[in-house]
Amino acid sequence: MIAEMQPIFSLDEAGRFLRMKKPSLRARIRRGQIPAHRIGRNLLIWADDLRRFVDRNGRQPHGGFAKR
């Protein structure tokens, strides 16, 4: 059975969602606070990982999660 795919965010999209600049986002990824996956030259962040980060850190996202 194929699992339902979840949205995937680019670094730019995740930064806009979290209201965080790229250097801050990259630092959190480096420290392991936000899991990211390198696909080729791109860093991608799964929506569930962003949700967990928001839940743990109380950051207020802007725009919310849209279903794709």
Image (cartoon, rainbow, N blue to C red):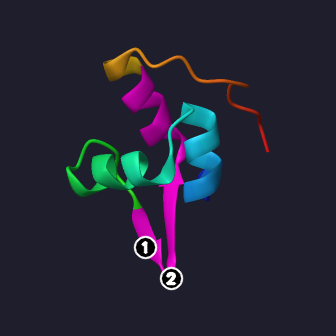
* Viewer can see residue 10: no
Q: What x and y, as percent, mark residue 64? A: 68, 24
Tell me: residue 28, above or below residue 59.
Answer: below
Instruction: Tell me where the magenta segment starts and ends, as one range.
Output: 37-54
Q: Residues within 10 Å of mark 2 (few under 14, many from 20)?
A: few
Are the residues flagged by discs 1 and 2 in contact, CB closer than 8 Å? yes
Identify the residue under disc 1: 38
Amino acid on which disc 2 is placed: Arg
Q: How many marks do you count on the picture?
A: 2
Residue at x 62% of width, y 35% of height = 17
Quarter where residue 58 is shown: top left
In reply to whether residue 13 is colored magenta, the answer given is: no
Q: Secondary structure at mark 1?
A: strand
Q: Position of residue 32 (x, y in %)?
A: 22, 49
Q: Residue furthest left?
A: 31
In depth, the one of 45 and 27 nearer the eye is 27
Looking at the figure, which quarter contains the C terminus? top right
Identify which residue is drawn at 77% across, 36% down. Answer: 67
Disc 1 marks which amino acid?
Answer: Arg
Q: Position of residue 45 (x, y in %)?
A: 49, 53
